[in-house]
Image: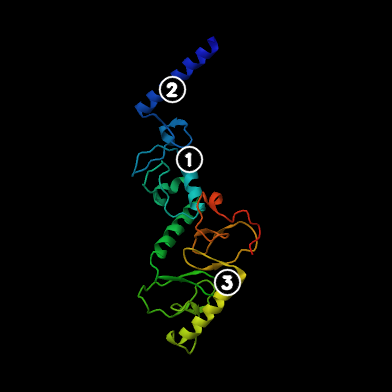
Amino acid sequence: MGNTTQKLTCLASCNQEEKQEEENGSSFKCGICMETMSIEKKFKKKKCSHPFCLDCISKHIYYKVNDNMAQVKCPHLGCPKLLDPLSCRSILTVNTFVRWCDSICEMMVMEQSNAYCYCPYRDCSALVLDECRIKGTVTKAECPSCKGVFCFQCKVPWHAGYHCSERGVRRERVEELFEQLAEKKRWKKCPKCNACVEVIAGCTVVTCRCKNLFCYKCGAKHTPMHSFTCPFIWIQDYK
């Protein structure tokens, strides 16, 4: 009984000391790991004052960037404030910082639907930008990755000797045949960009070339709770 009383008294004393240190501004309690630390280890944010340590914030950003998220919010529940790469650069690895910046750039490009397309060649599929940004003016383009020449408007390999309008009937027939093939092979379409994806084996969560995550079983956008709600999650075969 005496030992228990002494422990409770000691714990209360420690909590009182920590509270006093926080009030004096010499320490803080991290909102993620709940550890009390010196103020030097506190991550400084300009947009909000929620307290987090440098290590927890760097891990939070790392996992968000690995999930292909361009907009990383403050980890405090319900806080809408966004973190930015420049203010976090000193606590991130070079790889995480570069990936985060690339994700933000790609997100901004995706918002301009007429400013980009993907290389139509099967072994490439690189993202190609229309730097002129004048709708309908760019036709013949060269992929900077594979150097393949294609039509920026039709999104197909370059059709020498034909205008885009003259390829309409042929393109519709090709699309019809492709839809039949996709249905036969039971390929799934990305719910964001409508690109067809085929999975032979492996994880049921697919990352499309547009960076969107979706379930290959049902075709729905992937969420943290999707594994519990997908009606086809326990079906093993992909066909």
Query: The disc labelled 3 sits on which kind of residue?
Result: Ala
Residue identified by numbered label 2: 15
Q: Are marks 2 and 1 in contact (CB under 8 Å)?
A: no
| First of labels 2, 1 by sequence position | 2
- Residue 158: in sight, yes or no? no
Q: Which residue is mark 1?
A: 56
Quadrant of the frame with the N terminus? top right
Label 2 to label 3: alpha-carbon separation? 63 Å
Q: Secondary structure at mark 3?
A: helix
Report x, y in % for residue 217: 58, 59
- Towards the viewer: 45 or 211: 211
The local crowd at label 2, few if under 14, some if 14 to 19, many if 20 or more residues have their Cα within 10 Å, is: few
Which callout, 2 or 3, points at the residue further toward the start of the chain? 2
Residue nearest the viewer, comparing 57 with 165: 165
Q: Residue at x 53, y 61 (%)?
A: 219
Q: CA distance from mark 2 to mark 1?
A: 22 Å
Considering depth in this image, is 203 or 235 the residue closer to the camera?
A: 235
